[in-house]
Image: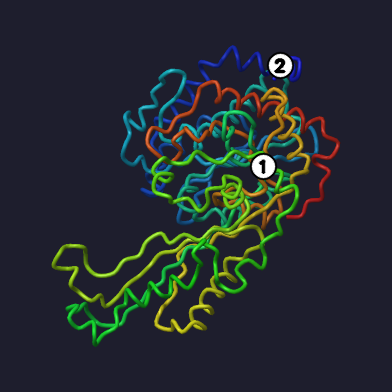
Amino acid sequence: MSDATLGSGPLAWVEERKDQLIADWTHACRLPSVSADGPIAVAEMAAWLAQRAEPVFDTLEQVEAPGGGPVIIGRLEGTGPGRLLIYTHYDVVPAGEGWTRDPFGAELHDGRLYARGAGDDKADVMARLHAIEAWLATRGRMPFTIIWLSEGMEEVGSPGLREVIAARHGLVEADACLWESYYRSIDGDAPTIGFGSRGVLTVELAVRLLDADTHSAMAGIYRSAAQVLTHAVASLTDAEGRVLIPGFYDAVTPFTADDADTVMRTPVPPIREDARQRGSLWSADERSLVRRWLYEPTFNLASIQAGPGESEHEATLLPAAARARIDMRLMPDQDPTRIFEALERHLRDEGFREVSVRQLNAIPPAASSLKSPLALAVRQASKELFGGVEPLLHPVVPGSGPLHLFASSMQLDAVMPPGTIRPDSGMHGPDENAEVNHYLDVVRLTLRIFELLAASDEFGQEEVRG
């Protein structure tokens, strides 16, 4: 992306201050904000971020989410009618094991910043704030209103965010939403843009047949809870992983020629060598794997437990109870409530009446237009940033999040632009990292999106449907 494309002002501002921008990003990554440890664990990061962002916006407030942490909402009035909501989250997942560096040391090595949250999602938090500052410093008032929302509990399901949005509906009402970033690229070539997120349904199946475990010598008399449960779980899918619950696929959008083209252009994500060696892939055909990854719902048996343990003595026990945890990633129009009801009905109809089902989590899926004014701006800006390479468009990303709260209650089209994340970035794993140059690219990309939106005849003219 050249200065001639955007104009030398904002880009020159970024270049002149890049060391300070990187220092800001580094500082944010040094503040632990592990939401799994509760609201208190994100308080320091929230306070620093609110103080850092306050001078940028006309108004800024911290709203305590019921059962969650502070949601920071800044509003900057623009000169035109459009309203862009910018969503990020400042919390991170636990550091976990396997790090070769301090996960909150935010060390720079060979042009990369290593820290938990370096990519997910503190790069977006700071880069977008820096882009707004660059525009204000060189071009004055924004050409459209920006609503900047950063939450602190995304990694644990965004508790209380629904209530915050409902209570501040007028404040956050917008025409489109720039969501947190997706892959910069999967193979280092084409930028990748996401337009929706999967839903998720997590359930626990449980069986209890006795009050207590008993000696396995009694297996000729008593039934094993583990056997009953495994038969029930086995009835839910076939050998290829296809879900056998009646009606499960009814709402899945038919696969199209455009989808097939995306599958052909999308590289398969890097596959672990142990998976190849042990034959744990669903298919040897990479195109089939990409299709499953991008366009099909998933079924995952996450755990199954029975009996008190695995010692030699305990192995001779007949378990009185057993339980399994299952999660399903759902495509747009698959309703978690209906899927849960279909699951209960299937188990009942198949004779597994002793199996109880408990819903642990349910997040609806969300979808957005690939041709909204924001979508077109992100697509054009991404193509320019990558030297004319056409971006890969993923209608629904493999993961889940709170996008449905904005898509449903506000009916916003949301777009996930390329960010700093690569398959080798260690997102949610040890040694998470992001390249410094890629971070600065996010600032530049955001600025170009701003300019393209400002030039759009349609942005801000959409009917407000919230």
Q: Quadrant of the C terminus?
A: bottom right
- Among the 4 quarters of the image, the one containing residue 375: top right
Disc 1 crowd, CA 10 A, few/some/many (<14, 14-19, 20+): some
Q: Nearer the viewer, mark 2 or mark 1?
A: 1
**x then y, percent, for residue 418:** 62, 34
- Comparing 431 with 296, the one in front is 296
Residue type at the position of mark 1: Met
Disc 2 crowd, CA 10 A, few/some/many (<14, 14-19, 20+): few
**x then y, percent, for residue 2:** 71, 16
Question: Which residue does the numbered mark 1 point to in the structure image?
Answer: 264
Which residue is drawn at the image coordinates 64% and 31% (left, top)?
Answer: 190
**Colouring scheme applied when the structure was drawn:** rainbow
> Is 427 located above or below residue 247 in the figure?
above
The answer to whether 465 appears left or right of 310 in the picture is right
Q: In 3D space, how far apart are the residues under numbered discs 2 and 1 (Cα atoms)? A: 30 Å
Which residue is drawn at the image coordinates 36% and 39% (left, top)?
Answer: 95
Q: Quadrant of the N terminus?
A: top right
The residue furthest left is 313
- Among the 4 quarters of the image, the one containing residue 321: bottom left
Q: Which mark is residue 347?
A: none
State how many labels appear. 2
Do the residues bearing badges 2 and 1 touch, measured as CB atoms within 8 Å?
no
- Comparing 384 with 406, the one in front is 384
**x then y, percent, for residue 234:** 44, 70
Q: SS class of the residue under badge 2?
A: loop
> Is 169 located above or below residue 43 in the figure?
below
- Comparing 40 with 462, the one in front is 462
Question: Which residue does the numbered mark 2 point to in the structure image?
Answer: 2
Which residue is drawn at the image coordinates 64% and 24% (left, top)?
Answer: 444
Q: SS class of the residue under badge 1?
A: helix
Residue type at the position of mark 2: Ser
The residue furthest bottom is 221
